[in-house]
Image: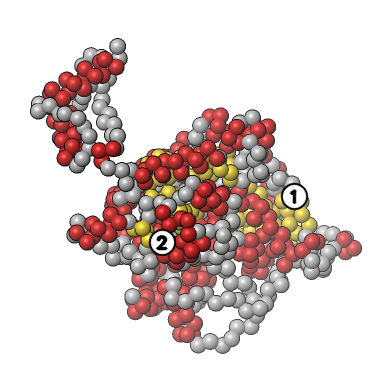
Amino acid sequence: MRTSAVFGCLVLLATCYAPVDSWSPTALRIPALHGAPKVLSARASTPALALRSPLQPSSLRPARTVQQNALGLRSAATPLEVEKVTGDVPSKHFVPNSDPNAKTFRVVLIAGFETFNRELYRKAAEKAAAQCPGLEIWVFTDKDITQNPEQLDSALDGADVVFGSLIFDFEEVNWLRDRLSKIPTRFIFESALELMSSTQVGSFSMASEPGKKQGMPPAVKSLLSKFSSTREEDRLDSYTKFLKAGPSLLKFIPVDKAQDLRKWLQTYSYWNAGGVENVAAMFCTLASDFGGLEAEFAPAPQKDTPFWETLLKAFKQLLGLEEPEQAQEGSAPAVVEVPQRGLVHPDRPGYYFESPREYLAWYRQHKPESKDWPTVGVLLYRKHVISELAYIPELTRHMEDQKLTPLPLFITGVDGHIAVRDSLTSPFETEAVKRGDMPANPTLSPDAVNVDAVVSTIGFPLVGGPAGSMEGARQAELAQEILLSKNVPYFVAAPLLIQDIKSWYQTGIGGLQSVVLYALPELDGAIDAIALGGLCCGDKEFCNANRDLQACNREGGEIRLVKERLLKLTDRIKRWTALRTNANKDKRIAVVLYGYPPGIGATGTAALLNVPKSLMALLTRMKAEGYDVGELPEDPEDLMTLVRLGGEQGHK
């Protein structure tokens, strides 16, 4: 594999980044949504990447200067002196340079369907402004497009960089499109294609040229294949690995547009890693690269390292054989890395367990009373874990209170199937492989552990997550194969990330939210989909008037869980897992037959199907397997007569 990787790199270098139109292997192909509830996009997970060879690279406009009285200027030495215009939203973060004629560099961030992260972005903006005098950062959410349009329009007018993520609403997209075109550097991640196509970083653009077929450059496609699993369903996971190491690799290609792509990848690396430190470093790096500002981490002199040694190190990082080096003091900070997949527990804050076996060994020692509890794998959004969202420990604690062992696995969103397939197993799978009833999984980790159930807090398809939504029917077969091999209940129980509690209680779950929570997961085989909560509406009076919502301590826009929904989830998990230990004769099974209109002998009718024989075959097999089905008549028609008589009596 390593030889193939080196060969792929040589192909890439030799090709020197051939001109292409666009590259978007994992785009969530959802156009701007008109007149419909908003839908959560990929991940925060996998972006689309598009390249083209423009005729003329865009140039940066001259930076503006600070117009302030020198007596009013403040030093960047103390973060407390950061100028902040806050409130609910938006917020401004700025420390002027001590030189009144120094240039100012403005970055505008617009966060879409992740209002629960706005405080994180504010903290990051405050930190970056303190580190980089002359950097002005405005933090907005998509709600400001309708609630504060004049203020947002004013901030965009004259902005040097705009950054947007998870923006899909039809009206909002149309409002932004023309305004974004006037800004020289644009980063739009995981949003409507109409907005993502406006991404521009120097000569790198996501806009496709008319008449050209979309697709990644052949050399890059060849390189990606060297690091991909042989499994078709794992290609998105391989793509995210490339995004992580891409900046290190592309710096060896002496072509301007490749370096512009590298800047895009570097920015995405900071954003994808998440957290205050990474987002602050992203802001400062943008100001340094595109605005010429000097941050406190001015680049340090690089040591003279042989080319091939540096290239080999980049490939080791791409293969996951070596972690990226930490930045030297004074240099641009390296991305604070968090594993792509891992496990967490609130009693070990800041620690990421590498494998389920390591986690479970610690957990059994930490909570010895849990040895007889059912073990439940819980799939979590990696970005939510990094952002330390409060609902995750709340869910974990609740499961423990209900005597369930939580196995909280965080994933990027596109790799849920890999976590289930390779990190979780069951006695059923082990025995079936031993008997030869199914082939052994070649990628099953030796550190995989047995689980009694799996809960996804993400929704979407198991294979590909948000990025696999547009091919759910095809990928559903792969998901079913994985779930059948484990043969444990698979639940989808998630907070509503695009709907607040108040609207949920008053009007029910919105159309597209129901697709995410119900329709797509059910194609895979998910059962008992449960909405665990939603975004806090901020209406304390409304919450206090509802028994299940009283004493809310969340701010508007934050994710909150509903106790009654949590109890519903754990009750269903315990009931389903208990069925494993019950004898078949003690299980109650309901068989539902079509019978409309009632009372006229229509029960058990179906076009071109023999319902009586099918029902008789089912009940006969159940009886052989120990189920109590009573005495069965010999003739299937006699069986249907009994069913119809019982149905008619029930309607009298």
Residue type (three-letter) at the residue carrying disc 2: Asp
Tell whether 366 sits left or right of 228: right
Task: Please tell me how crowded label 2 is: few (under 14), some (14-19), or many (20+) other residues with Cα within 10 Å.
Answer: many
Tell whether 281 sits left or right of 595: right
Query: For the residues marked 2 and 1, what is the alpha-carbon distance in whole angstroms?
Result: 38 Å
Judging from the image, what secondary structure is the residue with disc 2 in? helix
Q: Is residue 282 visible?
A: no
**The one of 544 and 288 positioned closer to us in this rendering:** 544
State the residue at coordinates (78%, 57%).
83
**The one of 433 and 89 positioned closer to us in this rendering:** 433
Residue type (three-letter) at the residue carrying disc 1: Thr
Query: Disc 1 designates what residue?
Result: 86
Locate residue 439, reporting x and y percent. 22, 60
State the residue at coordinates (83%, 64%).
74
Locate residue 233, reporting x and y percent. 34, 57
**The one of 327 and 309 positioned closer to us in this rendering:** 327
Query: Disc 2 designates what residue?
Result: 237
